[in-house]
Amino acid sequence: MVNFVKYRRFYYLFSALLILGGIVAMLISTQTYRERSIVRLSIDFIGGALFQLEFEPVPGQVPGRLTGAAIQQAFTSAGLTDVTAQQVGIGETYRWQVRANFGDDSAEQIEAIAKNLTELGQQLNLSFDAQRFRENFSEVSPVVGNEVTNAALVATAVASALVLLWIVLAFRNLKHAFRYGVTALIAMVHDVLVMLGAMSLMGLIAGWEADALFLTAVLTVVGYSVQDTIVVFDRIRENDVRHRGEPYELIVNRSLLETIQRSLMTQIAVGFVLVALLLLTSGSIQQFVGILLVGLLSGSYSSIFIAVPLLVSWENGEIPFVNRAAKRQAAAA
């Protein structure tokens, strides 16, 4: 019988390195963005206006080099403030995403921006669809952005508390039922940190922004990961009765082996669908699917290689400053 639990320290080390890399990306992000945020935030959270710009080379002419500074100048000269321009895509592209704050007369400023961008395009042998620009932009007030941010934090905190309470109640007949809730919560936090790290990294590399869909992805993965963890925990509960007297580590490893195939097959099936969507979509939907895929992989890993082995580490007193009595018993044995 393969002993997966035996190598738990390697699992912990891999997760620590993965999360550490994400933390580095988040620290870099705080020094990169004006909001000092750990990920690049969309207007859903910080408020403001979001513009999608797309220029096209004029047939038969050599296009000039379009820069972010030139685009920012087109907006600031129209009276907008806090302007940031981000190139969309990798390599030579004429698609840009601009965030800014309007002044007192947004309608007049839109006309001024359209005029400035059209003139900029003419100078660089690029065509610009001013009418499409006027019709396609998003605006969110700072008040609404703050409300979305607060709702996101509250939703995550409430979900965490309910998960802990529900697992403790569901496994109340087992010894140390509280441990099951705590380890499931740790696995959930692991997944959230991995997703934040991935979003922060992609924000720096490709300009991905955390919006309402990102929050949806996080909460979806939280539920998915907890459900996968509970499947293994439930088998541990059954085997604890069926194989009473066996060492706890053996019971846990047996339960893991009995459920791992089902868990992996389910995750692989969902993964195929997400990969297909990732390849066929674009924009915010592609970002949503990409982060969801990262969360799915992290959730599969944490359910099998973090939450379950942590139960054994806790039982054996291997966790610093936790369960010292169990540590003394393990040393005496």
Image: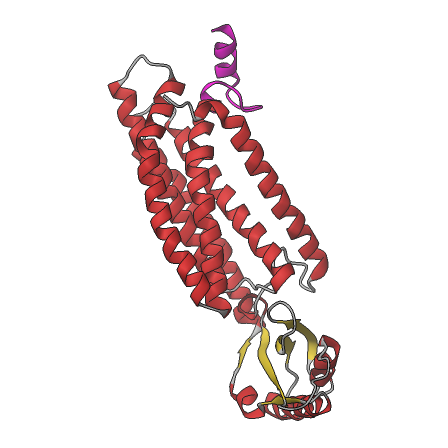
Residue drawn at (54%, 68%) of the image = 145
The answer to whether one can see residue 1 in this image is yes
Q: Nearer the viewer, residue 216 or 208?
A: 208
Q: Is residue 60 above or below residue 19?
A: below
Image x and y of residue 177, in percent: 37, 28
Q: Which residue is outermost to the left?
A: 242
Q: Which residues are magenta?
A: 314-333
Q: Is residue 85 above or below residue 28?
A: below
In this figure, what is the number of numbered marks? 0
In the displayed structure image, the side of residue 33 where residue 231 appears, left or right: left
* Quadrant holding the N terminus: top left
In the displayed structure image, the side of residue 74 where residue 197 appears, left or right: left
The answer to whether one can see residue 172 in this image is no
Q: Nearer the viewer, residue 316 or 251?
A: 251
Q: Nearer the viewer, residue 75 or 179?
A: 75
Which picture quadrant has residue 169?
top left
Q: Which residue is outermost to the top?
A: 332
Image x and y of residue 317, in percent: 51, 19
Q: Is residue 315 magenta?
A: yes
Image x and y of residue 175, in percent: 35, 22
Residue drawn at (34%, 40%) of the image = 263
